[in-house]
């Protein structure tokens, strides 16, 4: 894994740990043109698993793990991310499968970031 990908994954893990109390256990990221596509495994806390045991709770955890993180990145990307990538973060698209405990995040930058 390149140093750049490793540093990028560490930023994602650190931010999510600060926000949700648990960062992903494993992250796989690829850079494609102006996008970083990250697959995140092992995201859900025991409390979130309990909450998600009802249909209403599942929707609440899903919203927190998608809309909340997208809003957070819109307000301010993680410190150092744009410098590391040499590009401005334009958008974050994110979704999570609560039952399988994996998420996909697509970070869209204003310039080509692929190595």
Image: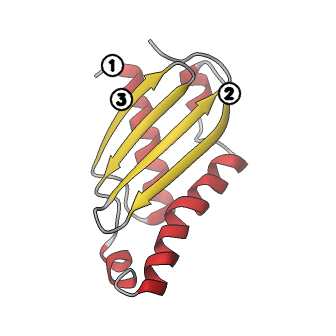
Residue 110 shown left or right of residue 115 in the figure: right
Q: Is residue 106 above or below residue 40?
A: above
Q: Residue at x 61, y 18 (%)?
A: 86
In the picture, the disc for residue 2 is 1
Q: Is residue 52 above or below residue 98?
A: below
Rendered residue at 45%/35% (across/down): 37
Report, in whole angstroms, how far the alpha carbon at label 3 lies from the one at label 1: 6 Å
Towards the viewer: 36 or 4 = 36
Residue 80 visible within the image: no
Q: Which residue is at the front of the view, 111 or 46?
A: 111
**Residue topped by disc 3:** 6
Can you give x and y, in whole percent of width and height, for residue 53 in the image?
34, 84
Q: Which residue is labeled 2 in the image?
A: 88
Q: Residues within 10 Å of mark 2 (few under 14, many from 20)?
A: some
Q: Seen from this angle, which residue lies furthest top?
A: 115
Q: In the rendered view, would you say 39 is above or below 35?
A: below
- Write the residue at 48% across / 55% down: 95
Instruction: Return the residue nearer the eye: 105 or 81.
Output: 105
Residue 104: x and y in percent read 42, 47
Residue 86 in the figure: left or right of residue 55: right
């Amino acid at each position: 894994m390149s140093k750049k990908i490793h540093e990028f994954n560490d930023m994602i893990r650190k931010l999510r740990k600060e926000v949700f109390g648990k960062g992903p256990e494993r992250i796989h990221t690829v850079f494609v043109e102006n996008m970083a596509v990250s697959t995140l495994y092992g995201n859900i806390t025991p409390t979130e698993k309990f909450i998600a045991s009802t249909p209403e709770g599942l929707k609440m955890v899903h919203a927190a793990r998608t809309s909340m993180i997208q809003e957070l990145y819109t307000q301010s990307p993680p410190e150092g991310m744009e410098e590391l990538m040499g590009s401005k973060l334009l958008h974050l698209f994110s979704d999570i499968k609560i039952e399988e405990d994996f998420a996909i995040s697509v970070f869209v930058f204003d310039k080509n970031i692929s190595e």
